[in-house]
Structures are given as C-alpha cells and as structure tokens.
Amino acid sequence: MNVKMSCTKEEIERKRLAALQKRQNKSDQNQSPNNSTIESTKLSRDTTLWHSPGPVRNSHNNSRNFHPYVKAGNSNNTESQNIVPVGKVVTGTVYLISEGRFEVNPSEFCTPLVNVFKTIPSKSYDASTKLWNFSISDYKDLMNKVAHMAPHIVLGPLPPYVLKVLNEEMLDINSVDISPIESTIRHKLMPFQEQGVRFGISRRGRCMIADDMGLGKTFQALAIASYYRHDWPLLVVTTSSMRETWQTKIHELLPSVPLMNIVTLTTSKDTQLVADKHTEVVIVSYKITGMHTDLLKSKKFGVVIIDESHYLKSHKAQCTVALNSITRQCRRAVLLSGTPALSRPAELYTQLALIEPGLFGSYTEYGKRYCAGKQTNFGWDMTGQSNSTELQIILQKKFLIRRTKEQVLTTLEEKTRESILLDQTLLQFTNKNREELSQMAEKYKSTKSGDKHTALINYFSESAKVKIPAICKYIRQLLADGSTGKFLVFAHHRNVIEAVCLTLDEERINYICIVGSTPANTRADLVDRFQHRESCRVAVLSITAASAGLTLTAADLVLFAELHWNPGILTQAESRAHRLGRRGAVVARYLLAAGTADDLMWPLLQGKLNVLNNVGLSKDTFEDTTVKHQDSRNNISQYLSPSTVKNKSDYIPGTNIRKISTDTSCNMSLQTQNGDKTDCNGISDDEKLADAFAEDSFFDEEGDELLANIDL
C-alpha cells in the first residue's frame, strides 16, 4: 500500500541544512586550504541569520565552531550560551490560551528567541509551564521579529481561521429583538432558553445549541426558525423515533403553521407532498435524507434544523454528504446536541463544517491542529487531542452555546453516581469462561489501534453473558427493597434485555420495554404509561435505541446493566430522568463485574470524558463515583431443584399470572397499542391480580419470604 508522505516546512529546512553540512564536511577533507576558505565563505552566505554581515570564517578550525548568532569579539562562554547548531532548526508552536492571549511553545530552549520575547511589551512568563505568552495585539509584531531568524528558528503561526474568528465582529446578544417570534412559543421560553435564541440570531441563524440534555433545545430551535419564517420552507432532520414528536411540537408551538403543511417524509409515496408548494415544513430521518437528497435540494429550504447532530460523526457517511450539499444552499442551519462530541474532538468537524463550510480548510488540517493528527501506514490517525483550549475558544465565540443543568436549573436536585461491584459468586464463570475472557483482554491490550474497537466489542459481548445472573439477582434485590421507587434499566445486548424482562415477569412487575424494533408511533404511549401509571415501576431500555429523545422523569434511579464505550451515550441515558420537570434527586447506578470488559471500559470512559472536558463540551466525571458492593446473601432457593418449565401460553403475557376465563374463546389476552393488557371483555390485568394470586398454586408468598431470610 502506497502512502503519500508529506513533510512540513521545518522538516524540509532541517534536511536541507543537514545536506549542506554534509557537503561542507566532505569539502573540508578533500580540498586545499584555499579552496576550503572559499567554500566556507559560500556556506556562511547561505546560512547567515541576519541581514547585517556576520563573522567571517577564514580557517578550517574556526569554521567548525562558527555560529550565526555569535557576534565578533564574544568569548567562548557567551558563544556556548547562544549556540544553535547550523544543521539544526528550532521550531515552535503558537496557540491561544484565552480569547486575548497566545502562548509560544518552542521545541527547546533558545536564547536568541528568548531575547526576542523580552522585547514584546505584553510579555508574560509562566513559571509553572516555563513558557512565554503574549497579548493577541502583539501577535504580528512577534511573528515579524521571529521571521528574520528563519530558517534556523521557525514558529508555526496561528491558522488564518483562528485570526478570522478573533477579529470577526459579533452582534451583541442583548441587542437582539425577538418580537418577530410567534407569541405562542415566545411566551413559553425560560430566561436561559431566551438567551440561547438570542445567541442563535446573533450568529445569523447558523449555530449549534449544545445545552445539556433536558433543557429544551427543541423550543430554542423552533423559536429561531420562527424568527426566520421569511426564509422558509423549513427542514427538520432527526432520528426515526423522533419524527412524530417533532411534528407534534411544531403544531403545538407554532399554531400558525397548518397541520396539512407539515409533511413527514417516510416513503416514496410522500415525495409529491414534499414537492408541493404549500408544504412549509418537511420532517425527515437521517437515513431518508441520504436516499432523497436530490428531492430535498430541489425544495430549496431556507432553514434547516438538525436534531441529535452528534450522529454525524463521519464526514464520509452518506447522510453527512447529503446534508453538506443541502445546508450549503440554506441561509440558516441550527444544530442540536446535548453531546456534540461523544468521545473525541474529531467528531466535531462534520458538524462545524455544516455551520461554516470551508472555515477549517479540510478535515486533515483540522485534525492536525486539534486531534494530534499523525500519518500512519493506514492513513491519518485522528483519535487524539491537541490545542484543546484554542478549540474551546473558537467553539464558544463562533459556533455554539452550552449550558448545564447546574448552571440554569437551580431548583433541579443533583444527580449522584454509584458503581456496584457485582457478587463474583453469581457470575456465570466457568474455567473456560475465565480463560477466554482473559485471552480477550490480552488481545485487546496488544492489538494495534486500528483493530482495538473490534477486539473490545468481542470482549464486551462475551462479558454480557457472564454478568446476566448477577444482574438479575440485583434487580430482584431492588424490587424487594421497599424504598426503591420507579427505575430505568439500560442494557445493550438483546440477551441481557430479555433476561431482565423475564426476571420482571417472574416477579410480577408491571413494566415497559423500548428497543430498536419498538415502533416509533407506540413509544410515546409507552412513555406516557411509565410516567403516569403508579403500577408501572420499571422501564427496560436499549442503551442505543432509547438513550435520547425520551422524557422519563418519574424514575428515581437509572440502572445500567451494561456499559457503553461512548461516555456521551451514558450521560444522555442518565438525562432521560434527570431533566427539566424532575422533582427530587436522581441516582445513576452502574453494575460492574471484575474480570470482564468492565475492567477496561470504565477507565476508558473516564479518559474520553477528560478529553471532552478539555474542550468545554462536558463537565461530567466518573472519578467521584461512589463504589458499593452487591449484597452477597444468597437465597437458598437457587440451590434447590429448578421449577417445572411453564407453558407461556397459559399465562398473561408479561406476567406469571395464569389466565382466568370462563370462555375458551377469550383465553388469549390482548395488548393495546400503549402496552395495557386486557382480555376480550375489557378486563385489565391489574383488575385480575387479586383473584389470580389466590388461585395461583405455584406462588407461595410466605414460603418465598422465609427462604429469602435464610443465609448459607
């Protein structure tokens, strides 16, 4: 595989001087003294640093000790203090440390360079970092002075886009008049939401609202869109599960838009409605955007709202390419995301390019500057971070506004995190399991960066099987604890979700379950059931399918049966309960098992959060998590003979309650669209509970209570 290697200016200069020195050494050995003097004089002209004449080398011996910074008559001691070898280049990087100051980080100490620093009026020396910083107003003066010292001293300048952002005049937020916004939504805006709307308008409708989850980004986006109503039609791009929610919100908050003028593009049958000139709003999923790009471009949208924009991580993905072409012809583009970057700065580039196309030049330039980009045999590696403070300054000044719940919701009680170490005796470990997991862990550690994710996924998948018994036992313990109210259970793998649901069935607990295959039109009904029905205690949720877009503030506890490799997904999932409208504290609890993938993923998550914290995109941390242990009291019943396998068709779905019916034609219970179970006479499961318990011979509450209190 051919990899095109590129050299920086500093590397080219270093190689040129090395070749020049090599030629000089060869000339010194082979030529006469007279010729050597001529060549030495020529080399002196080639490598002089100053415009004024430097010292003249007229002998073989002193030519070896020559240095362009040495003034005539200087002693050897002074010369050694100022020495910069002819064949060597001192380089340095320049970057912002605040909106008004920049710092210089040279590759090594260099006295002539320090002498230049001391001539700058705004100079400041940081003793802790041993670096010099200056006011941005002195930037040109410093760079001009250092330019005369080339090619032996070269400083990489601030990129043009950084200077452009710093010098760009922004409209004062407080001077923005929001009266053109439709009164229905304008009067519902909270003060911090109103500030977010003003920010978006001050950035001329091209921005990102990156508030914490649950702070009303939808309200702010629709308010900005209402302000720019004269630029409509409006395109809303969101996830498949949130299309109906957006349609409802638009109809509720912008009543001046007729419902018939709002179109959700789901199939090819809807294309005619999209093309209709009376259609003002089109709602589309990411996948459909890539399939109907030409149709959407022909509509010539003036305003675009991109919800959950962090899904656009790859600049090569079909939907990203499609949205690039659509937003380029739009005057306004508003992006929404509670976690703009899920784990690293590289994921921001595609979103920033949608807001301001071409600002950073190319993905490679952005990656080299902010992702510690380096070229490998497999292409560019952009998984790191660099110049994080500078990136944070650019984001806040030009692109996004971000507020956390702690900053704006003083009445919202805090969220605490706990990690529960699962009981080792309950893990489904055999000697073979231990050996396999140990091998997977070693494989992950020894695998090169390109294949690490695949190795982690395999390790993660096998770990799930081992954790299932301990997870189910912990949920039983929670249910037995009378102080535990409603709670959410997040899991990733299907077998874990199914095991949790089976446990709840056996415990006769009313619950809802939302996974990727759950129809979008039933999710709202399931959420409503969990929120408002006292009998519904648990929501079992897929961590990838239900970590965003749902409001489940009735829960006191968010339980993670499994981890996820992206910390942004986890914090999003926590915010299903800890959000606007929540009364009371929320606990996020993570179930961890020693000897599984959790050993690697937990510290990995904290490392990724640290990266996001450095660029101001997160203030979360898992380091202050309270560590607890699962109650290891084993129930003697687990050592008894397993109960007879029951025929599921004999019981009401989702419970261990036998069907009670006098009519054989009514044996099958029905499940309504919102998840309520009724028989053909309309009698709900809740109404059958008392009679069912009385006749259920396999249920012995007193005996089960007795067994639970016996210790082995």
Image (cartoon, helix red, strand yellow):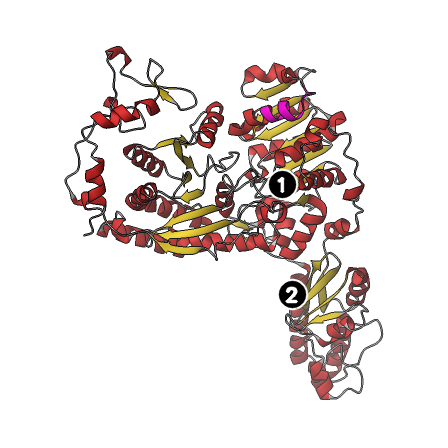
Does any portion of residue 373 appear in the rendered image?
Answer: no
* Element carrying mark 1: helix
Give the residue type at disc 2: Lys
Read off the residue under disc 1. Answer: 351
Q: Is residue 446 magenta?
A: no
Q: Which mark is residue 15?
A: 2
Identity of the residue furthest to the right in this view: 52
Depicted 345 relative to depicted 290: above or below: below
Q: Is residue 406 left or right of residue 510?
A: right
Front-most of 16 and 515? 515
Q: Nearer the viewer, residue 198 or 238?
A: 198
**Quadrant assignment, res 678:** top left
Residue count near mark 2 (Cα–Cα under 10 Å), binned few <14, some 14–19, many ≥20: some
Residue 104 location (% of width, % of height)? 70, 65
Q: Is residue 256 magenta?
A: yes
- Write the start and end of the magenta stretch as one range: 248-257
Mark 1, mark 2: which one is toward the viewer? 1
Task: Give the structural element (helix, strand or loop) at label 2.
Answer: helix
- Percent of width and height locating residue 645: 19, 31
- Comparing 683 with 423, the one in front is 683
Q: Which mark is residue 233?
A: none
- Say above or below: 468 vs 223: below
| Marks 1 and 2, how far apart at CA | 39 Å
Residue 394: percent from left, percent from top: 69, 50
Q: Residue at x 58, y 42 (%)?
A: 338
What's under tag 1, amino acid-wise?
Gln
Q: Residues within 10 Å of mark 1 (few under 14, many from 20)?
A: many
Viewer-nearest residue: 646 or 101: 646
Above or below — where is 123 with respect to 72? above
* Residue at image location 47% in from the left, 52% down from the top: 605
